[in-house]
Structure formats: structure tokens, C-alpha cells
Image (cartoon, rainbow, N blue to C red):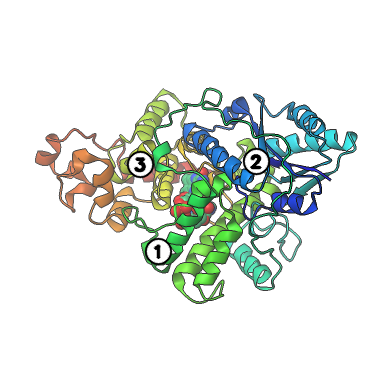
Amino acid sequence: MRPLVWFRADLRTRDNTALHEACAAATRGVLAVFTICPVQWRMHDWGDPRASLVQRSLAALSKDLLDRNIALKLITRDRFRGVEEDLLKLAREHQCTALYYNSEYEVNEQDRDHRVNAAFNDAKLPVHAFHDQTVVPPDTLRTGEDKPYTVYSPYKRRWYEYYNAGKAPSARGLPKRQPEIVSTPDPIPERIGDFDPHDAHAGLWRAGQAHALSRLQAFIQHKIEAYKEERDFPAIDGTSVLSPYLAVGAISPRQCIEAAVEANRGRLDTGSKGPVHWMSEVIWREFYRQILVAFPRVCKHQPFNPRYDIPWRSDAHARADFDAWKTGNTGYPIIDAAMRQLITTGWMHNRVRMAVAMFLTKDLLIDWRWGERYFMQRLVDADLANNNGGWQWSAATGTDAAPYFRIFNPITQSRKFDPDGRYIRRFIPELASLDDQIIHEPWRHASLFDAIDYPRPMVDHSLARERALAAFKVHA
Ligand SMILES: Cc1cc2nc3c(=O)[nH]c(=O)nc-3n(C[C@H](O)[C@H](O)[C@H](O)COP(=O)(O)OP(=O)(O)OC[C@H]3O[C@@H](n4cnc5c(N)ncnc54)[C@H](O)[C@@H]3O)c2cc1C
């Protein structure tokens, strides 16, 4: 028995279900493979930050696999279509007798996997697919009426029950080392398709499971206790910043939950506020994945709740407004600081992700899909389920009870969550000399403002709010 393990969004050797099972079943070694599909990735709005992290994670994975005596082969094909032939050819060339992989849930990935499964079944080679992206498999928890959950809080309560009943699998360590190596590893390419091989953010995002695990440990040791108090302040480094590693699968959600449960003396939903709150954020990730599985329309640019998918602005003025938002030139410092954090680091703090998404959809009435796409292209943690969930939540087309009349005031957000303007100063140096009061609304101080190279607010928030309410009300 010689398994071929197909890596996808699970670029790690520890606690990798498919790899672990394959290594346990193997009698004549294990071969690993990853498929590089640059045109498809572009079609899925991947940008340089994510492609670069994947490329560098592959280099780390290849080394980690070699430690287990497993070679990582690479297949490059522009799109998903046809990878079934490449995988089958590789399996045959190396006398592999079965295919192992962890499931991906997005629509195109599922179509690809159906084709691969059919090709392997035709060739009489068994396929073993596993749930591995979440602690609780996405199609497991159902309401009393046997429907998927569409509201987070009851989902979380069921999730707690399931986990506390010991039904979720535990994290595993390293897989069994193989006595013989099959083939030699392929070199990791310097350049993938037309993605920039020198992504400007690469230095900020070290790749590999060792780094991801040490980041988790540092967070658990030093920050998780204060997480609940500090998580909303973008100037504070108070969150785990594990999202890029969860997105490429350099770390598993089981590893995250178990480390937090341990820090919380074995408890999940009671005990210390910091760990409990952090775990509830990881459960948001599980929630959005089960939404994507139950409602695949969210993968197809369709709203979860079509009622509030209002006729968004899309003319030349809207495009110019969108450009100002993208480049961090709206005239609202907290919004611009956040958009510039995204440009300069490839990441953005959650509090301000919500603020900028609200601003685009409610203050500017611009289609959430434009923002969703731009985020996918720019974020190092770009993840369809979480990104779509966040955008639809902000636009009021989402699953949750975020009513359309919940409209964040960017100045209130700024004063509340960046009270001393530290975050704004970090990303907008032109405002650095303003004091803690003025920095949130610099235009109100004409003499100071005229001396600064910074735009006036592109919209008046109270007028924009009225415009949004009127637009949504027609559909209420
Ligand atoms: C408009 C918008 C777009 C977003 N796009 C993405 C995206 O592309 N990729 C992504 O991973 N997250 C996205 N999020 C969710 C959230 O902002 C990030 O997961 C979080 O900021 C990552 O930082 P962290 O790792 O320090 O999180 P922590 O606060 O340390 O949380 C731990 C983990 O829990 C998960 N998590 C936390 N908050 C959320 C949430 N609101 N929804 C779902 N999962 C969550 C993440 O996997 C995160 O790494 C988006 C949110 C919004 C409002």
C-alpha cells in the first residue's frame, strides 16, 4: 500500500488528518503532491501576499515532509481542469495505490475533487477524503428542524455541546516516519505564474508550521488572558495574528482550540474571559465554513440574504470613490489608516475591517463584492468563507442579525477604539503631529488642517447615513 497525499489548504505535517491516516496505512512509503494553478488562483482573486505565503509555506512543508521521509512533488497547471489527469499520471508513475486528501469546500474546489475522484475510481484506485479544516465538520451540527444554522449564537451553543461531549477529534502529533522514500522532492519554483516573486510583505510573514506554532504559543503565554479587553484596539498587538497560517493550513484549528482549552484549565466555555472569547472567534471561522457548505451561493458572488442587496452605486463617481477608499484617501483617518495598513502589511485588524467594510457599503453605498474582491487580492490571510462572511455581515446581506440600520460612525469608532490616535499616526504620518483630540477629525481645525497634506472627508457621515437608510428602507 503506497498512498499519494494531495496537499491543498493544509500545508503542515503535524495534526494533518489525511497525512496521518496515509502514513499509518502505508506499507511501501508515501508520496506527497501539491497542485499549483496560477490562473485559477487569479480567477479566485488571489493576490501576491497569499501566493507568496503559499509558495514559502511549500518550501517549509517540503523540508518537514523530508523529515518524515516523504518527497513533495509539484504539479503546475493553469487551472483546476485537467489536474485529475496529472494526479493519476503521477500516481501511476510511482505505483501509488490510493489518494488521500483533506476536503476543501468551495464550489470550484468541490467540482475539481469530483472529477479527481471519478478519474481515480475509474482507475480502481481508492480515494480517502477527510474533514480537517474545522474542529467540527461543517455539515455536522443541525437545528432542531434539521436545518443548517444560520445564526451564530445558537450554532456556538451546539458547538460547545458537541465539543464538551468529546465528539470532536483531538489534534494529533507528527505522522509516522516512513521507512522508505518514494522519489525525490521537486524544487519549489521561485516564481508562480504572474505573481510577484518578491512580494513586498514577505518579510513580515514568516512561513511554515514551526513559526505558526511558536506564534500560537507566544499568544497563549503572553496575550490570551487580556484578549477580551484588548482585541478591539488596532494599535495594540492583542490578537493572535494567526489568520494567515489558518488560511494556508500551516496550523490547525484543533491545535488552536486545544492550546486555549489548556490555558483555560481544561475548560471551553467557562473560566477565564480571554481564552473563552478567543475560542469563540475561532468558532466564527467554523460557522462561516458551515455556511459556505450549506449555502454554496455565497461562493458565487450571490448574497446570503438577497433582500438587502440593494442597487449599489456603480457609475464613474462610485469608481472614483472606490479608488479613494482603496488607497486610504477618504478623509476619515481611522478608515484611511486601516486601508494603508492593508497596503503596507497585507493584513488588517478585525475592528477596522468592520469599520472600512461598513464605510464602503453604507457611507459610499458601493457594492460589497467590490470590497470583498479587493480584500481577497490584498490580504495575506485571504479566505473565501471568512472574507465573504465579514463583508456580507457589514453590508447587511449576511447571515447574521446585523440590521441594515446598524451603521458605524467612523469618528465614534476612531475615538472609541483608537483613543490616543496611535494607530492612525502609525499609518498616516502626515497626521502624526496632531493631538489626541484633533486627530480623529482634523478638518474641524482649519488652521492646522490647511498646513497638512491630507484630504477632506469625501462624504458627510450624517448625510451618508440618511442616504443609506433611505436606500435600504425601500427593501425592508
Ligand atoms: C470585512 C471583513 C473581511 C474579513 N476577511 C477575512 C479573511 O479574508 N480571512 C480571515 O481569516 N478572516 C477575515 N476576517 C475575519 C477577521 O477579521 C480575521 O480573521 C482576524 O482579524 C484575523 O486576526 P487574528 O488572527 O489576529 O484573529 P484572532 O482575533 O486572534 O482570532 C483567531 C482566529 O479566529 C478566526 N476569526 C477571528 N475573527 C473572525 C471573524 N470575525 N470571522 C471569522 N473568523 C474569525 C480567524 O481564523 C482568526 O485567525 C474578515 C472580517 C471582516 C469584517
Q: In whole angstroms, how far apart are the C-alphas of marks 2 and 3?
A: 28 Å
Q: Amino acid at mark 3?
A: Gln
Mark drawn on residue 8: 2
Relative to the observer, which residue lies in front, 386 or 10? 10
Labels 1 and 2 touching (C-beta < 8 A) = no
Q: Amino acid at mark 2?
A: Arg
Mark drawn on residue 341: 3
Give the mark nearest the N terminus, 2 or 3: 2
Asked if residue 400 can be seen in this view, the reply is no
Classed neighbour count for the residue bearing mark 3: other residues with Cα under 10 Å, few (<14), some (14–19), many (≥20): many
Is 165 situated left or right of 316 in this image?
A: right
Identity of the residue drawn at 67% across and 45% down: 69
Identity of the residue drawn at 47% across and 56% down: 214
Determine which residue is flagged by label 1: 223
Classed neighbour count for the residue bearing mark 2: other residues with Cα under 10 Å, few (<14), some (14–19), many (≥20): some
The location of residue 94, given as percent across then percent down, is 79, 33
Is 218 situated left or right of 59 in this image?
A: left
